[in-house]
Image: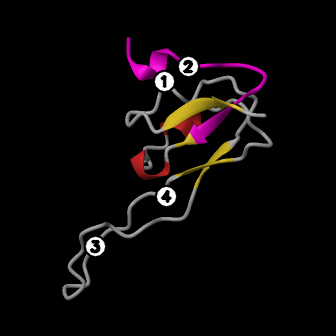
Amino acid sequence: MSNNENIFKGDGNKAKLKFYTCKGSGECIKACPEKAISEGPQRMPSAVCLSSGKYEMLPGRAVIDESKCTGCGDCVPVCPNQAIEMSAVS
């Protein structure tokens, strides 16, 4: 069983992003029925040759609006990088 299959769902839980694990695949954005996840600003690649001036910006990392998140957990299993986990909110 993968980590993505063993998740907490429902009231009292919210999706939390593991920021540096997110690679911006966008799968969680498509999976969220509440539209609580959006794409953040594009980012620079970690290794870029500035002298050539040629590089492609990377997609933005996911941004989760906790006020819209219902804790359904639909975003967790679709993330190819396991960058989202459900956690209890107090």
Label 4: which secondary element:
loop
Q: Is residue 32 above or below residue 44?
A: above
Q: Quadrant of residue 69?
A: top right
> For mark 3, does the 10 Å Cα neighbourhood hold few (<14), some (14 to 19), or many (20 or more) residues?
few
User: Of label 3 and label 4, which has the lower sequence position?
Assistant: 3
Label 2: which secondary element:
loop
User: Of label 2 and label 3, which has the lower sequence position?
Assistant: 2
The amino acid type found where label 2 is placed reads Ile
Which of label 3 and label 4 is nearer to you?
Answer: 4
Please name the residue that numbered disc 1 is placed on: 77
- Of residues 34 and 72, which is closer to you in this image? 72
Which of label 2 and label 1 is nearer to you?
Answer: 2
Please name the residue that numbered disc 3 is placed on: 55
- Of residues 32 and 87, which is closer to you in this image? 87
Can residue 13 be seen by looking at this rendering? Answer: yes
The amino acid type found where label 4 is placed reads Gly
Image coords of residue 16 (percent x, y): 60, 39
> For mark 2, does the 10 Å Cα neighbourhood hold few (<14), some (14 to 19), or many (20 or more) residues?
some
Marks 4/2: CA–CA distance: 25 Å
Which of label 2 and label 3 is nearer to you?
Answer: 2
Q: In this picture, which residue range is highlighted in magenta?
A: 1-16
